[in-house]
Amino acid sequence: MRTCVRDGCGLGRALQSSSVPKELPADWRERLTDSVYNYHVNRSADSGKNNNRFEGDIASRPDDGRRRITPISGVVDRDLMWLDKIVPYEINIQFGNDEKKLILEAMADMAAKTCLIFREQNAKDTSYISFTRRDSGCWSYIGRQGGPQAINLAPGCVDKIGTVQHEVMHAISFYHEQSRLDRDDHVLVIWSNIQFGTNNTNFQKSIRTSARDLPYDYDSIMHYAFNQFAKNPKYPTLIPVQPAHFGRKNLGSRDVMSAGDVEKIRRIIRRDFDRSGKAVILATCAF
Ligand SMILES: [Zn+2]
């Protein structure tokens, strides 16, 4: 007999999975109500300008829907990849010295752990990341857009290198971890506690993605917090359902990339494509 969580009633697909516990503990609310992990809950929702934002902090352009997307929640089209692993950037003068230092530190950490190469944009670069503060919120486009593309970091978005790395990972092709097609085997979405309005797409799965053989990563820097976009942030919007992780509040990280994030990047950042134009995914970067 299927058990229905009170806030999850009517959303039983996740609970029907054989990998999900048949019953959640009676005290599951109490086990999840300490708001010790409250990163950017409502951060995007309060801007009032994010009607074109998918999953809260992802900016989109009109032609995004025609593009083929991912393995590993990343883009696979040649024109959306950063070729030769090089990501040119500029940092707008709006940022203070400490903020600029942190942005550089975030990129240096990513470069050291993967095969990405970040360098300052020059006159020959047509495509590059532009760290800017022209809008509210922390947001980014998915993949290389062709031309300058903003990573918007409003005040409060340059607090940890992980916050910057989250947006840079969007720019190099990644969606959120809980958007994976197999996420119902790993997290239960509490729809009734999710804010209505512009953010109601935030918890949809990215149907054009495939996780391939990479395990679900509760520690990913691309994973939402347990109460992200919650009407009542004391209660969860995402509950881990794998027995080894049930009850966790510390979903995702905003400190630094997880080992899984590093592996994602190392697998997808390749300059080689087969004859059909599909990216060739190898186990590691070719240093
Ligand atoms: Zn994001």
Image (cartoon, rainbow, N blue to C red):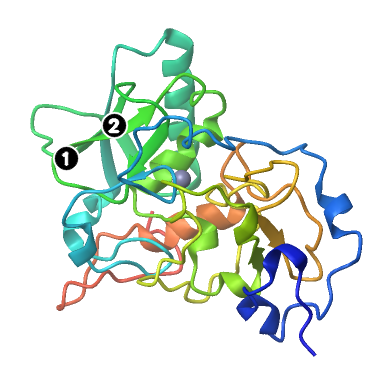
Residue 67: % across, % down: 21, 65
- The residue depicted at 75 percent of the width and 70 percent of the height is 242
Relative to 77, 151 lies left or right: right
Residue located farthest toward the bottom when viewing the structure as drawn: 1
Q: Amino acid at mark 2?
A: Arg
In the image, residue 254 sits, relative to residue 47, either above or below, namely: below
Q: CA distance from mark 1 to mark 2?
A: 12 Å
Q: Amino acid at mark 1?
A: Ser
Q: Secondary structure at mark 2?
A: strand
Q: Of circles 1 and 2, which is in front? A: 1
**Which quadrant is the N terminus positioned in?**
bottom right
- The residue depicted at 35 percent of the width and 57 percent of the height is 269
For the residue carrying disc 2, how many other residues have a C-alpha within 10 Å: few (<14), some (14-19), or many (20+)? some
Pointer 1 residue Cβ closer than 8 Å to ligand 1: no
Which one is in front, 259 or 55?
55
Question: Does label 1 or label 2 sit earlier along the sequence?
Answer: 2
* Residue position for label 2: 119
Q: Secondary structure at mark 1?
A: loop
- The residue depicted at 66 percent of the width and 46 percent of the height is 227
Residue 153: % across, % down: 40, 26
Relative to 81, 194 lies left or right: right
- The residue depicted at 74 percent of the width and 68 percent of the height is 241
Which one is in front, 62 or 26?
26
Which one is in front, 287 or 203?
203
Which one is in front, 8 or 55?
8
* Residue position for label 1: 127
Residue 131: % across, % down: 32, 27
